[in-house]
Each structure stands twice: as structure tokens, then as C-alpha cells.
Amino acid sequence: MSERSQYYRYEILNSMNRFVFVLIAILLASFEVTAATRPNIVFIFADDWGWGDLSCHGHPYVKTPNIDRLAAEGTDFHRFSVASGVCSPSRTAVMTGHFPARYNIDGHFAWVSSNAKRNMPDWLSPRAPLLSRFLQQGGYATAHFGKWHLSNNMIPDSPLPSEYGYDTYGAFNCAGEQMPVHEDARNAVAFMEQCQRDGKPFFINLWLHEPHTPFHTVPKYRWRFRDLEERDNIYASVLSHADDRIGEVLETLDRLELANNTLVVFSSDNGPARAARPTELELVHDTATGAGYGIGAARGVTGGRKGYKGALFEGGIGVPFIARWPGKIPSGKVDDTSLISAVDLLPTFCELGGVTLPTSYSPDGVSQVAALLGNGTTKREKPLFWKMNSHWPIQQARPHHWVSYAIVDQEWKLVTNKDSSYLELFNIVADPYEKKDVKDQQPDVVKRLLAKLADWKMTIPDKPTGNVFSDERSQ
């Protein structure tokens, strides 16, 4: 080979090497950008926190400066709804991305005899598709701190939260040791610090007790609202205490310089609890959380929405939903058009976390990443469904708690009693407070939605199956 040929060959190989080096550098840079934008996720799920129980939503005396900060630095979504008017099914929907009726979880988990009477399992199966496990398998460090209630502390042989895809947990309303209700934020802070040291993205369920009964008051917060009448004072004090603990989490994200790469979401499992009739203020004891004031101190408000906890009207299922991810989610924005459901959270969080869902898994929800990032409303091709065991005929003391089934399809919401002998229809886009029943003016819509509801009922199992029953059932 001539000297000139060797020279050209050297130059060609050298150019190829430079090209490969640049290509690798580009790919590595691309990977680094992707890793840098994979967010930590902190999902704060309160218990019975009404839509109107925020100072940023206009409450006259409740003060929530830390949640207000989330709203100022993120987006406040006004059309979010949970999948039930009560706790356990609502949480099931978040965990599985499925309507809770698919697991026969139509009410709260209680004693075994009560679960059996209501045709319910005794716990959500750990073998169900789970948000926490998907994220854990995708490389996230996972933790749960706070209320559980996907089983109950009265069922000692129910699975522990560690069997549901969590690396660590501290919880109450579960089997085993009950975490003190006010230690949720302290545990979350320690977990975030550990994840920062380990260099791992994290997912935290921070499921607050407040403002569920019993109301566990602390003198510092009672004093903060000392000018209020006692029931209002109690209610405002527990919300303020919870808001301060949220503030501890936000301050830690700032201190660890993690805020800009952390999605923080605040929401509630259902609307506020209210006594059906005048109730004396008294102390009660809960086997999981201890002593506190009972339902007589419940003062939650729904921001004008119809009904309260336990109802499938918007007062029972329309709850706060505030999301912050600095630089990604628009700040100081109110979104009153995006119809987001609790069943959407699993596909949304997994997409944001770069986690591919198994091909065998089919969520009832849809990813709402575009809506979160302010890039337009995700059109719902599939309806949303609700199922609860509700009383009929209508009770005078609880006039909005008769609905057993509901369907939302585009702008229409249809609610029915158990046998569909009575129903109401609302255009929830034009009438979000459900003031005008338009079933007589829209018979074709009623017919279409009833048909879809009937088809959905055919997909719901008659009874729970699998390893979801306590040994107490055989005693």
C-alpha cells in the first residue's frame, strides 16, 4: 500500500472515530437530559377535605398558606373528580387506575362481618396492578406515609403496605403497628433525604388523616384560631396543622434543591363529611388513630357543589386537585375545563416517570400529561363510571345520597338509583353545580347513557374473588 493510500485510510478511520465519538456524546447527553427531567412524585391525598376548605378557594377562616403556595406556583384544576364518595374505593382507583367496582370495593373497609354483608373483599389484592409497583419496577424508590385503608386495622391478617410495591412505609388503618397520624411529614422528609443521598428518583404517597374524624387537635393550632366558635376552631386547627406539615415537605424540597424536579400534587379522597342532623360535640376514640372530636365538629364546605361525603353528586366527588412542577406545569393558572379523574393518575404518573405499562394492563383512565403541562385538554373517549350502595327512597336528612350509579360522558352526567327507576341528567359543562335536571329535554341522551351504563354493569363481577378474604370468614 502506498504512503498516500495509508494516509487516506488513516484520515477515513480517524473521521469515523470522531463521528462515533460525537454520536456517543450526543446519545449520552440525550440520556442525561431525560434522566434530569424524570420527576420525583409526591402525591398528597387528604381525607374528607372539601373543595371549599382552602383559603385559595375562598374559605372565610380556614388558612392554608402552603397549599395556596402550590396553587400559586402550579395549576389549580377545578374539574377533578375521584372515583367514589368514600375512602377505600377512592384510594383503590388511584392505586389501580381502575374503577373500584372492578374489585367489588364499593364502600370503606371495616370489620370482616361488615365487608361480607356488603359483598366486599377484606382488602385490595396485592396482586392487582398497582401504581406503586409499576414505579418501583421502573426504578423509583417508593414510600407510603399516612392513612392506608386499603384494608383495615381491625383485620390483623390483611397484607401490610410493604406487599403493595413500597420500599418503606408508615401507616394507620392497616394491619400491624399504627403510625401516629402526625408523623407523616417527618417520615416523608427523612425518605427524601435518603433518596437524595442514594441518587434515586422517588415516589411518595403522603396520605393525610385530616380532616377525617376523630379531629386530633393540638393546642398550638387551637390557639391560632382562638377567636372562632369552638366547632369552627377545631376544624380550622386540624386543617392548619395538616397544611403546616405540607409546608415541611415543600421546605425540604427547597433545601435539598429538588423542587424544580419534583411533581407535587394535592387532592382529597372525597368531599367533606357532615352530620346528617344536629350532633353534639363529643370526644370519640378510633382504634387506629386514638381520641379526638367526633362528627359534631365537621364543618367542611364544597364550594357550592351539591352533596357531601358519600354522595355521587359533585360535592361528594369533586375535590381539590392542585399540581406543581416548576418550569413544566404553568404557574398561577386555573384550569376549569380539563375533566380529570382519579383513574387517570396511574397512567399519568407512569408516563411522566418514563415507566412503560405492561401490555396486559388496560387502565380505565387516560394519561393527562398534556393537561397537566398546560398543552390542552385530553379528550375522553371512554366514559367515567361510579357505583355505590346508596339508600332509596331519598332520605330527608340526606337528600343527595340516593345515587347508586353515575356515568359521565363528554358534557353529560347521568345519575340513577339502584334499579334505574329514577334518574337525573345534567350538563356538567354548562351546569357544573348540577342545578338543572334536563332528562325531559334530552331523552336521546338519557337512552344512550343508560345503554352505556348497562354495558358497563355487565363487566363488573358479581362478587370478589382471589386471596382477598380474612381467615375470620371461616370462623
Image (cartoon, rainbow, N blue to C red):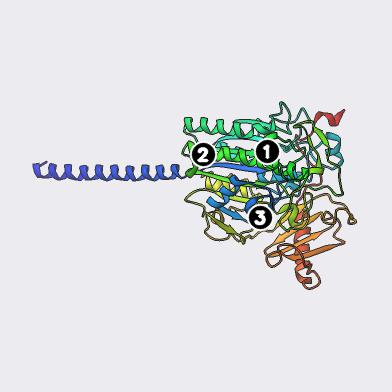
Give the x, y percent position of residue 221. 68, 38
199 or 223: nearer the viewer? 223
Give the x, y percent position of residue 137. 56, 36
Of pointers 1 and 2, the one earlier in the residue sequence: 1
Instruction: Measure the alpha-carbon separation of dots 3 and 2.
Output: 27 Å
Residue where numbered disc 3 is placed: 58
Give the x, y percent position of residue 340. 63, 55
Of pointers 3 and 2, the one earlier in the residue sequence: 3
Dividing the picture into quarters, in which one does residue 87 lie? top right
187 or 274: nearer the viewer? 274
* Quadrant occupied by the N terminus: top left
- Say which mark, if any, is on residue 435: none
Q: In the figure, 416 relative to 259: above or below?
A: below
Give the amino acid at mark 1: Tyr
Residue where numbered disc 1 is placed: 221
Q: Nearer the viewer, mark 3 or mark 2?
A: 3
Give the x, y percent position of residue 147. 70, 36
Instruction: Measure the alpha-carbon separation of dots 1 and 2.
Output: 24 Å
Q: How many marks?
A: 3
Residue where numbered disc 2 is placed: 253
Q: In the figure, 11 relative to 289: above or below?
A: below
Give the amino acid at mark 2: Leu
Give the amino acid at mark 3: Gly
- Which residue shows up at 29% across the image and 45% down it? 22
**Residue 288 vs residue 373: left or right?**
right
Dividing the picture into quarters, in which one does residue 432 lie? bottom right
